């Protein structure tokens, strides 16, 4: 809960000194000059106001108290608005609000959302994939302006819950986007709004409200069984160096749980000797965390085959295309039911499993097979980087048969021998 107080800049001064407003929100603190001054001899520290009974009090001193009450009223209004609309209390917003109410400072020259977003995506130092998502989101917003707003540009103040609901409806019903695609668009709009707010271009926090959520669903997510991995590993690819390399990288991904980007930096110096055997020690690109991964026998064979370093792999997109071909060559073609929300409706389709295999399947396979093999969950999470067991459990792709198999290994389901005396 935010608290506030008034303090003097120089409480020991003999002349008038500035009164500061201090706003605290947990461990965060905002120090704001009210522009009001008072002689310390007239200041009541306990009441944090000018002592109107002090000697030499003037009408100007009385006006100071009135102005301080205005600051208190403004803060109360801001806190009430955040609470009513279930918005986070933000000290950056407090400064902008006070500037506007008391010093008449205005934000920088007004920009439309798309003008800002277009300039930001050109200057942002992001990965190519992220930049591409920015561009496609800007394109969708531009189409939204034409079809929903008759060409009227979106301002920062327009990005509220009404916009959110209509934009999602437009994406689903008019553009017929999949739910995850809509979620990505919303996520990037929130990025644009946050960066613009930090630059002082607006004080609208509606995009941070609970109703302004990023939708997401798991789609086309499968894992490979030990039998299926054996089929892929056993393929004779001696006549195709590219497929052979992709297969080996994919297999190491299935046996280490490392992300696609981390597999590309797996070099001999990442293999170290520990007290219990050789392990991979690597700092992950996504989180910056150092992880240790025991070496599976197949990982050892593959690294030895390639001189301790994995072969170079194509882009993620090309890699996904090649691993689908590998799965098909291995005969992993049985149909799998997948559910996907598109155009606002949930649809179930049957697709060959080989078409659902991607680079990310390797991490999911590692986690699921390790779990089925009764490796401690916390140990698996140290490698996959999941922060909570709840999230990790949702990451696993275990069907009813998988759970039945796990349960069958439990002593409760094992037949107990009767003692015949």
Image (cartoon, rainbow, N blue to C red):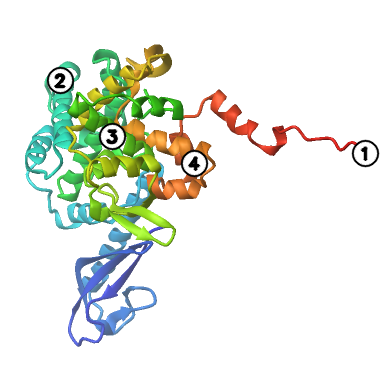
The CA span between labels 3 and 4 is: 31 Å
The CA span between labels 2 and 3 is: 44 Å
Q: Is residue 256 left or right of residue 117?
A: right
In x, y percent, where is residue 118? 9, 35
Q: Nearer the viewer, mark 3 or mark 4?
A: 3
Identity of the residue drawn at 38% across and 44% down: 384
Query: Which residue is under mark 1?
Result: 421
Residue 41 vertical placement versus 207 (above, below): below
Identity of the residue drawn at 26% across and 82% down: 11
Query: Which residue is under mark 4?
Result: 390
Lower position in the chain sequence, tag 4 or tag 1: 4
Q: Nearer the viewer, mark 4 or mark 1?
A: 1
Residue 68 vertical placement versus 313 (above, below): below
Question: What secondary structure is marked by label 2?
Answer: helix
Q: Nearer the viewer, mark 4 or mark 2?
A: 4
Q: Pick whichever, 6 or 51, lies toward us.
A: 6
Q: Pick whichever, 166 or 53, lies toward us.
A: 166
Q: Quadrant of the C terminus?
A: top right
Q: Nearer the viewer, mark 3 or mark 1?
A: 1
Question: What secondary structure is marked by label 4?
Answer: helix
Quarter-wise, where is residue 298 in the image? top left
Lower position in the chain sequence, tag 4 or tag 2: 2
The CA span between labels 3 and 1 is: 57 Å
Question: Do the CB atoms of the residues marked 3 and 4 lie less than 8 Å apart?
Answer: no
Label 1 crowd (10 A; few <14 / some 14-19 / many >=20) = few
Residue 85, visible in the rendered structure: no
Lower position in the chain sequence, tag 3 or tag 4: 3
Q: Which mark is residue 248?
A: 3
The CA span between labels 4 and 2 is: 39 Å
Q: Pick whichever, 230 or 140, lies toward us.
A: 230
Question: Do the CB atoms of the residues marked 4 and 2 lie less than 8 Å apart?
Answer: no
Lower position in the chain sequence, tag 1 or tag 2: 2
């Amino acid at each position: 809960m935010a608290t506030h107080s008034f303090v003097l800049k120089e409480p020991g001064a003999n002349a008038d000194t500035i009164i500061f407003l201090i706003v605290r929100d947990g461990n965060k603190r905002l120090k704001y000059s009210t522009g009001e001054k008072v002689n310390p001899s007239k200041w009541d520290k306990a009441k944090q106001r000018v002592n109107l009974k002090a000697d030499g009090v003037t009408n100007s001193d009385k006006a100071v108290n009135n102005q301080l009450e205005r600051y208190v009223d403004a803060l109360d209004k801001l806190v009430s608005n955040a609470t009513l609309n279930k918005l986070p209390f933000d000290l950056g917003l407090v400064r902008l609000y006070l500037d506007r109410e008391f010093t008449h400072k205005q934000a920088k020259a007004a920009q439309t959302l798309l003008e800002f977003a277009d300039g930001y995506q050109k200057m942002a130092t992001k990965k190519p994939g992220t930049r591409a998502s920015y561009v496609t989101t800007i394109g969708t917003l531009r189409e939204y302006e034409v079809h929903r707003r008759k060409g009227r540009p979106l301002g920062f103040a327009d990005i509220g819950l009404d916009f959110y609901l209509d934009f999602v409806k437009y994406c689903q019903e008019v553009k017929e986007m999949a739910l995850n695609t809509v979620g990505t668009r919303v996520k990037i709009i929130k990025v644009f709004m946050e960066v613009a707010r930090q630059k002082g271009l607006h004080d609208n926090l509606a995009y941070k409200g609970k109703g302004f959520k990023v939708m997401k669903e798991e789609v086309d997510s499968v894992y490979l069984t030990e039998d299926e991995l054996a089929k892929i590993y056993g393929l004779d690819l001696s006549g195709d160096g590219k497929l052979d390399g992709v297969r080996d990288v994919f297999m190491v991904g299935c046996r280490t749980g490392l992300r696609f980007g981390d597999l590309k930096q797996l070099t001999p110096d990442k293999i170290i000797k520990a007290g219990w055997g050789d392990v991979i020690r690597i700092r992950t690109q996504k989180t910056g965390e150092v992880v240790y991964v025991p070496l599976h026998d197949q990982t050892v064979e593959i690294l030895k085959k390639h001189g301790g370093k994995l072969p170079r792999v194509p882009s993620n997109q090309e890699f996904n295309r090649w691993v689908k071909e590998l799965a098909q060559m291995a005969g992993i073609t049985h149909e799998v039911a997948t559910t996907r929300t598109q155009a606002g409706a949930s649809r179930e389709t049957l697709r060959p499993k080989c078409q659902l295999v991607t680079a990310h399947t390797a991490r999911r396979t590692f986690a699921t097979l390790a779990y089925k093999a009764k490796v401690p969950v916390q140990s698996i999470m140290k490698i996959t980087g999941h922060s909570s067991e709840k999230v990790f459990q949702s990451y696993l792709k275990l069907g009813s048969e998988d759970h039945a198999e796990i349960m069958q290994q439990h002593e409760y389901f094992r037949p107990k021998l009767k003692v015949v005396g």
